[in-house]
Image: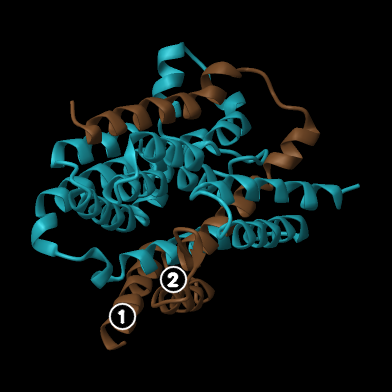
Amino acid sequence: MRRGARIGASLFPAAAALGASFGVLARTAHLDAAAAIVMSATTFAGSAQVAAVSVLGAGGGIAAAVIAALLLNARYAPIGISIAQSFRGSVLKRLAQSQLVVDESWALAGGGTPRFDKRVFLGVGMVLWVGWVGGTAVGALLGQAIGDPSAFGLDGAFAALFIALLATQLRGDRRIIAAVGGAAIAALLIPFTAPGVPIIAATVAVLAGWSRTG
Amino acid sequence: MTEAWAAVLAVGAGTAVLKAVGPVGVSGRSLPDRASALLELLAPAILAALVVVESFGSGRSLVPDARLAGVGVGIVAVALRAPFWLVVVVGGAATALVRLLS
C-alpha cells in the first residue's frame, strides 16, 4: 500500500489541481461549496462530475445531468468486475474499498491483468481521493476569486493527463488496436450522441483487439 | 433540497453502485480467461476515447482549439518520460498560453 501511495503521490498535484478546477466549475454552475465537496467525496470521478455540473450550469436539468454522469461512470461496472477476485472480507469492507475505483487507481495497479496489485490500488486510490476532495474544497471556496477556469488551461491539462494515462497502457499490438479503435469510435460518435455515450461505445473496440488473438 | 443537491446525491448513489458491482457482487470468483482477455483491452480503449473527447469534444461537435497545444506538449512530455504532474502542468500552461495569445 505504501508503494501505491508513493505512485499516487506523483499524481497528487494533478488530482488536487483538477479537483480545484472542478470546484471552480461547480461554483459557476450554482453548486454551493458543500455540494461540490460532497460530490467529490461520494462520486470521486472527475469527468462524470465535470459533465454533471456543466449540464446543470447550461440548464439541462437534473435528469440529463445524472444520466450523462452515470453514462460516463458505467465503465466502472466492468472495471470493478475485472478486479473483483482481489476483494475479500465483509460486504461493508468491499463496498468501502470499491469506492476507490477510478481510472487511475485501476490502471496504475495493473487492473485487468494477472499482475493486479490490490495494495497499490488502495494506496493510489486513497492518495487521489484526498487530493481530489481537498482540491475541490480549495477550488469551490476560492472559485469566485479565480475567475474563468479555462483561462488557466485546465481543460487542456485534463486532455494531457489522459494522454499520460493512455501511454502507460500501450504495450503490445492488441492494446494499441483497442486504443485506436476506441479513439475512432469516440470521434465518429461525438457529433451524433449525448455526452458520455462516445466513451461507453468505445468499449466495443475491445472486440477488434480481441479477435486478433484468434 | 435544491436541484443541484438532488443531482449530487443521485450521481453519488448511482456511482457507488456501479463501482461496487464487481467487488461486492462478484467477489471470490474469477472470470473466464476469454473475458479477462477482453477486459484487459478496456483501459486503452476507454482512455483513448477520453483523450479524443477531452481534446476535441465540445458538446456535440469536434472543435480544434487551444486544448490541442496542451495535447501536443503533453505528448512530448510523455515521450520524455515526465512525471504525471509535470505533464498536466505543461499541458495546462501551453493551453493557457495559446488561449492568451489568440
Q: Quadrant of residue A188?
A: bottom right
Q: Residue at x 68, y 40 (%)?
A: B39
Q: Is residue A28 left or right of residue A58?
A: left
Q: Residue at x 42, y 51 (%)?
A: A7
Q: Are marks 2 and 1 on the same chain?
A: yes
In this rendering, the count of numbered labels is 2
Toward the top, the furthest residue is A90
Q: Is residue B30 left or right of residue B96?
A: right
Q: What number is the disc on residue B99?
A: 1
Q: In the structure shown, which secondary structural element does the residue marked by tag 1 occupy?
A: helix
* Chain A visual colour: cyan
Q: Quadrant of residue A192?
A: bottom right
Horizontal and vertical percent for residue A24? 20, 54
Write down the chain letter for disc 2: B
The residue wearing badge 2 is B82
Horizontal and vertical percent for residue A37? 21, 39
User: Residue A168, can we see it?
Assistant: no
- Figure quadrant of the N terminus of chain A: top left
Q: Quadrant of residue B28?
A: top right
Give the residue type that dot 2 points to: Ala
Q: In the structure shown, which secondary structural element does the residue marked by tag 2 occupy?
A: loop
Horizontal and vertical percent for residue B102? 31, 87
Give the residue type that dot 1 points to: Arg
Q: Is residue B98 left or right of residue B24?
A: left
Viewer-nearest of discs 2 and 1 = 1
Q: Is A103 situated above or below B102?
A: above
Q: Residue at x 49, y 59 (%)?
A: B60
Give the CA separation, mark 2 to mark 1.
24 Å
* Chain B visual colour: brown
